[in-house]
Structure formats: structure tokens, C-alpha cells
Image (cartoon, helix red, strand yellow):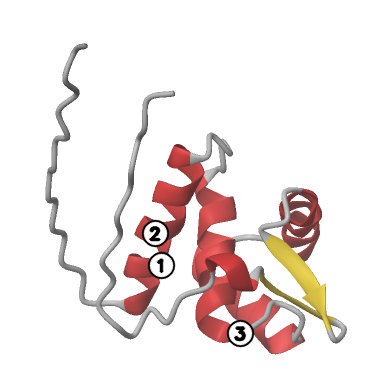
Amino acid sequence: MEERKTIVQRIKKSEKESMEIAKRYYSLLSSINDLKLTEREIQLIAFTAIKGNISYSSNREEFCTLYHSSSPTINNIISRLKKLHVLIKDSGKIKVNPAILLNFENDIILQISLIHG
């Protein structure tokens, strides 16, 4: 019987801003799960995770200003992300699915296992 070897590779990346950490995290999730999220979708998910929701008009306006976007664009992105279950509606507010929501003020250590079989 052939022996399988386990390879461990550690990669470390430092970021100063919580938003940058959130964008990296959601980019990795998109890649690993083959979600094919666009840069703008990742920006919206990260922004929503940091702000708590994207339902308040002040949050939407801030996102539009920060990323040079429009309200109709946000609505289209939200619709797609809800279909993917990345964003959910909770108590009338659009939020990041709790299954993929982290506190981006903390250091994050991810373990990704790619298993044969």
C-alpha cells in the first residue's frame, strides 16, 4: 500500500486595516469554494462584515462613496450574494452569513485542508 504524505505550508500576511483582512479572507473563501466572486462583491461582503449590515442608508452611501459605486449596483450584488447564501436577511437587515463572519479586529489563523478522496 502506498503511503500518503501530508504537507504543511504556512503563509503569513500582515495587514494594518480590518477591511483589508476581511477582503483577503473573503477572497480566499471565494477561491477555495469556486464562488467566482468579483472584486466589488468581495468589497461589499467585507464592508458589510465590518459595519454589521448593509441595510442602513448611511452604510450604503459610505460604500458607494468609498468604492465609487451606485445604489442599483449594490442591490444587484446583494441579490446575487443572497442566492449564494453569503448574505442573509436577519431581522430585516442584510448581513453576512454568520457561518462565514469573523471578528476582523483579531488575528486570524486559517487551516485549509485539501483532501484526496
The residue under label 3 is which amino acid type?
Gly
> Looking at the picture, how far across and down is residue 55, in whole percent?
76, 80
Q: Height in image: 81 above or below 36?
A: below
> Looking at the picture, how far across and down is residue 103, in whole percent?
42, 82
- Badge 2 marks a residue whose secondary structure is helix
Q: Nearer the viewer, residue 110 or 84?
A: 110
Looking at the rendered image, the quarter that the N terminus falls into is top left
Looking at the rendered image, the quarter that the C terminus falls into is top left
Compute the Cα span from label 2 to label 3: 16 Å
Residue topped by disc 1: 22
The residue under label 2 is which amino acid type?
Tyr
Q: Residues within 10 Å of mark 1 (few under 14, many from 20)?
A: many
Give left or right: position of 2 versus 101.
left
Residue topped by disc 3: 52
Check contact, mark 2 vs mark 3: CB within 8 A: no
Q: Residue at x 39, y 59 (%)?
A: 25
Q: Which mark is residue 25?
A: 2
Check contact, mark 1 vs mark 2: CB within 8 A: yes
